[in-house]
């Protein structure tokens, strides 16, 4: 299958994206939730090995198939890792027909003007070159919005699209993720500003360019429908943002323009000490619920 076939799958296939890209400061929390305490490792290398084993267990589970999982977002170390002797992206795409993406941001700056921009990403072009060789389809980068600040949200969107331009030069699909925090004191106000800013930036894209958008599920269903209908948008996907899986799926099931790209809501019930059958059964329950919310709208 070619890049074009990956693109067709991403734009048309029913299902959702698995976000398996915990990194840096989020990794210890992900391991704790999985049942691995902090004293189970004594170095970053050991921590990384444990989270890699967790991700491999998810990706190789019988229920983790392309029937319902369209794509998976990977952390850089996971992209560079192997499952047995097979590179992770190769296993996902060549063997499972799951489209691989790569998280490329390096975390967030402190909040300014109600938002947190992305930190600089040194060596981005080098990473993108490796991603192309490993047949990664696209990338994801996250920044956050807490307040409905027009200037702050404008700066977030501007930075995201600047990064997207650099990524597109490598032939990769950028996922733009300006996350509105669910604890925002005026989430709806921020959503209104974000919609306008995104539409303006999309309108300015060249006709041959397209992006994907990863957004917090809006308070008003179908608020982002104009984005899903925009000719420069391949797909709009939803992050769970700290909502429980039940709540995230309830909200998503009424939003016709979005499919899921969940992390904690997908893997949050999995535990290190589960036997393989129980692990897969719990994962299957999450996959089935998220798939239903992504594909069967009310």
Image (tube, helix red, strand yellow):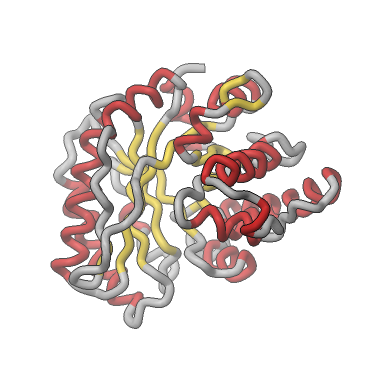
Q: Is residue 181 left or right of residue 94?
A: left
User: Which residue sits at x=59%, y=70%?
Assistant: 247
Name the residue at the front extreme: 42
User: Which residue sits at x=23%, y=27%?
Assistant: 169
Point out residue 89 in the picture as x, y percentages from the top left corner. 53, 27
Nearer-the-camera pick, 295 or 167: 167
Nearer-the-camera pick, 98 or 229: 98
Point out residue 21 in the picture as x, y percentages from the top left corner. 50, 46
Nearer-the-camera pick, 221 or 69: 69
Total tally of numbered discs in the picture: 0
Q: Is residue 122 left or right of residue 255?
A: left
User: Which residue sits at x=59%, y=28%?
Assistant: 92
Give the vertical position of 37 relative to 8 (above or below): below
Residue 69: name its quadrant.
Answer: top right
Residue 271: name its quadrant.
Answer: bottom right
Give the vertical position of 232 relative to 261 (above or below): above
Any part of residue 64 in sight = yes
Any part of residue 289 in sight = no
Name the residue at the bottom extreme: 185
User: Which residue sits at x=35%, y=34%?
Assistant: 173
Point out residue 146 in the picture as x, y percentages from the top left corner. 31, 72
Give the vertical position of 269 relative to 71 (above or below): below
Quarter of the image with the C terminus in it: bottom right
Point out residue 83 in the picture as x, y percentages from the top left corner. 65, 27
Residue 216: name its quadrant.
Answer: bottom left
């Amino acid at each position: 299958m070619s890049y074009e076939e990956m693109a067709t799958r991403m734009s048309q296939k029913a299902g959702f994206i698995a976000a398996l890209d915990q990194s840096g400061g989020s990794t210890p929390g992900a391991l704790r939730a999985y049942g691995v305490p902090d004293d189970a490792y004594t170095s970053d290398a050991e921590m990384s090995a444990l989270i890699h084993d967790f991700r491999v267990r998810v990706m190789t589970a019988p229920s983790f198939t392309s029937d319902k999982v369209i794509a998976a977002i990977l952390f850089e170390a996971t992209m560079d890792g192997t499952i047995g002797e097979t590179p992770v992206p190769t296993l996902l795409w060549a063997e499972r027909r799951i489209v691989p993406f790569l998280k490329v941001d390096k975390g967030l700056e402190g909040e300014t003007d109600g938002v947190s921009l992305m930190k600089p990403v040194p060596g981005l072009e080098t990473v993108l070159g490796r991603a192309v060789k490993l047949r990664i389809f696209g990338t994801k980068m996250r920044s956050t919005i807490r307040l409905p600040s027009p200037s702050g949200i404008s700066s977030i969107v501007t930075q995201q699209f600047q990064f997207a331009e650099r990524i597109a030069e490598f032939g990769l699909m950028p996922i733009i993720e300006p996350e509105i925090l669910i604890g925002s004191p005026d989430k709806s106000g921020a959503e209104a500003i974000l919609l306008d800013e995104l539409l303006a930036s999309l309108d300015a894209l060249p006709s041959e360019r397209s992006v994907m958008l990863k957004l917090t599920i809006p308070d008003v269903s179908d608020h982002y429908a104009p984005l899903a209908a925009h000719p420069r948008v391949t797909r709009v996907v939803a992050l769970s943002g700290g909502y429980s899986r039940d709540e995230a799926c309830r909200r998503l099931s009424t939003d016709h323009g979005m499919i899921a790209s969940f992390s904690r809501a997908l893997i949050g019930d999995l535990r290190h000490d589960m036997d393989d059958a129980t692990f897969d059964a719990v994962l299957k329950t999450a996959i089935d619920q998220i798939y239903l919310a992504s594909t069967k709208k009310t």
